[in-house]
Amino acid sequence: MEKRLIKKDALAGIAKKMAGDFLVWAPVKKEDNILFEPLQKDAEPFFAYLNSKNAPKNVFFPHTETLIKYTRTEKGMVFSEDENKAKDAVLFGVRSCDAHSFALLDMLFDQEKYKDGYYIAKRQKTTVISLACVKPPYASCFCTSVDGEPVSSEGADILLTDIGSDYLVEFVTPKGEKLTKYFGDTKADAASETRKTEIVAKAKDAIKSKIPAHEVKPILDKNFDNPFWATIHGKCLACGTCTYLCPTCHCFDISDEVKGSDGVRLRSWDSCMFPMFTKETSGHNPRTSQKERWRQRTMHKFKYYVDNFNAIACVGCGRCVMSCPVNIDIRKIVEDISKL
Amino acid sequence: MQNPYIPYPVVVDKIITEVDTKDIKTFRFKFINPEDEAKYNYIPGQFGELSIYGKGESPIGIASSPTKKGYVEFTVQKAGVVTSALHEMEEGEVMGLRGPFGNSWPLEFLEGKNIVIVGGGFAFTTLRSLINYMIHDDNRKRFCNITVIYGARNPGLLLYKDELDEWGKRTDLNLNVTVDKGDANWKGREGFVPTVCKEVAPSKENAVTVICGPPVMIRFTLPVFFELGFSKENIITSLEMRMKCGIGKCGRCNVGSKYVCKDGPVFSLAELDKLTPEY
Ligand SMILES: Cc1cc2nc3c(=O)[nH]c(=O)nc-3n(C[C@H](O)[C@H](O)[C@H](O)COP(=O)(O)OP(=O)(O)OC[C@H]3O[C@@H](n4cnc5c(N)ncnc54)[C@H](O)[C@@H]3O)c2cc1C
Ligand code: SF4
Ligand code: SF4
Ligand code: FES
């Protein structure tokens, strides 16, 4: 694996240089939020961030995306697909947990039988550069409980690790290696690798929040009807914040919009927390209250995804924990389930 | 590779109003591009997404049999936005069709067995596809006795009336049509589907029941088949959930770990027992 060293203050310059050549998604400051957005000319990326407010999943799975366009003509409806227009891009500086989420989303969108060309096209064209968490940013981070690590190359093409005065740059995949030219020509020495090994261990140690994420699977298998499910949702507002911010939540709606003789078919994020999500035209709704919806959310992450893909659909980023307006904490839920 | 979100363009070739209340129609579509018909290679029990630009899409079971070439049919009840727009369509208009999606009636499993088909109301559509498939000259020998029990609330609500007449004349199919309540012209059977099932009392020997209908019908019919000795492995049904993508991505239609659009809609009762009872 190719490894180099760059000076720490060189990072923003590299991102800006890349932005001259292709689309670069980078963390930027917007009011008091940090968001992953296309880096505009003259804009400053902000790499001293903890984590972004939004999960960077929107790079591959935008909040709203056109599936097809259509026009009414004399000959009837003519439509064109909007797929495969993905541009060469770099997603610069995502946290390890968020890069891990891409590996999880790939399992769903890039399956054997049905492939989601919209997602896959963007994924293939985008190089992911992870910025490891040498100091885990929040007390609510629990990546180590869900098969992650604060310094990890899972889901990344290039991994950047802050080793003091420099970043150690590791080109993890062939796709990442194509970008070596942006990272100077200082080869990493043995000392810097030793330093990284120490940092990895320390960072892992610093994650204090732990949940029994694997242990609950057999319990969930047997406890669909447990009275416990009635105890979670009491305060839930069904606002959907937890699912919108979650890097692994992928549910969407499909809807049509028409203006004059032109129209589009869009997909947009949806949420299993919304009462309408499963409501059928007849009025029948298989999930009649927030209790069933919270059970679905928990089951989906810690049982159904494991059944289908042998992976937990949570990367431990803690966004849902930090942003839920009524402080519902998925860590506590998993903890409680482990005691059922 | 075919983009599964893009509908095939189809033309509305024929519209048949099925019922007196006029809110259930059968739509026959022809593919505008002949090569699309070959790609739309379906099996009875699968469904399609009917796509009307500007309105949206609806998942609808395929009502025709793949043994009928040149077209594909869907029987649709007028319900909300898309199905109402569909009911406004006229012959010759162009719209879209996605699919075919889902698993299907388990044809291989049914082969060499006595088949009991139980249908109620307008959920009869994919059963009709299965019946027409099984009684086709190429296939009839692959199945043993075929018994059909089909009920509607009143004679005006029976679907596919011409076909029912034809099936009734066949000697290789035991057809039992019933209505909850007949009218002055009705000469057939009266009675609810569960009662008729009890009367017909199909043998469990080497037999499989395929059942589709409104929840109340299913609820009262299943005990009849349990009493007749049918095992849960040998009772097959089809589920309905709200759907969007049809390909297991949008996360809307799961029952436990299974997506009804992709892993279903057809399940045996034994399989359903293993899933969460959330549908
Ligand atoms: C596998 C399957 C087979 C079906 N087969 C038939 C059939 O043969 N004939 C028939 O008349 N109906 C069938 N339905 C039900 C039919 O899909 C709904 O009645 C229809 O989608 C209502 O759409 P709408 O736009 O008119 O209603 P609206 O309420 O205006 O639209 C809501 C949207 O939500 C979705 N939706 C709403 N209800 C349902 C539902 N029950 N099932 C699935 N998606 C839903 C659709 O995307 C729909 O466009 C089937 C449903 C499924 C899942
Ligand atoms: S469930 Fe919560 S902690 Fe887990 S990945 Fe989603 S937002 Fe992060
Ligand atoms: S963020 Fe909190 S209140 Fe909002 S839907 Fe999620 S659990 Fe409910
Ligand atoms: S309809 Fe989208 S997952 Fe089944």
Image (spheres, helix red, strand yellow):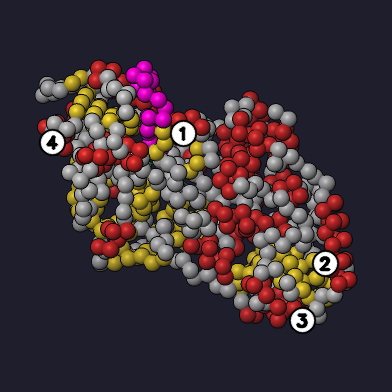
The Cα atoms of the two marked residues, 1 and 4, are separated by: 35 Å
The Cα atoms of the two marked residues, 2 and 3, are separated by: 16 Å
**Residue located 83% across and 59% down the image:** A200
Residue ID for mark 4: B166
Q: For residue B230, which quarter of the picture? A: top left
Upstream in sequence: badge 2 or badge 3: 2
- Where's residue B105, x and y in %? 34, 40
Q: Which residues are magenta?
A: B222-240
Neighbour class for label 3 at 10 Å: few (<14), some, many (≥20)? few
| In this picture, residue B227 sits left or right of residue B92 | right
- Where's residue A227, x and y in %? 63, 25
Nearer to us of marks 1 and 4 is 1
For mark 4, give the secondary structure.
helix
Let me know if residue A136 appears in the view.
yes
For disc 2, the chain is A
Foreground residue, A115 or B186? A115
Q: What amino acid type should be assigned to the residue bearing mark 2?
A: Asp
Q: Is mark 3 within 8 Å of ligand 2?
A: no
Look at the picture and state if A190 lies above or below B171.
below
Q: Do tag 2 and tag 3 residues touch (Cβ < 8 Å)?
A: no
The Cα atoms of the two marked residues, 3 and 4, are separated by: 80 Å
Residue ID for mark 2: A162
Foreground residue, A185 or B214? A185
For mark 3, give the secondary structure.
loop
Q: What amino acid type should be assigned to the residue bearing mark 3?
A: Gly
**Residue located 39% across and 60% down the image:** B6
Badge 2 and badge 3 both on one subunit: yes
Nearer to us of marks 1 and 3 is 1
Foreground residue, B55 or B216? B216
Quadrant of picture, ligand 1:
top left
Residue ID for mark 3: A184
**Residue located 56% across and 46% down the image:** A308
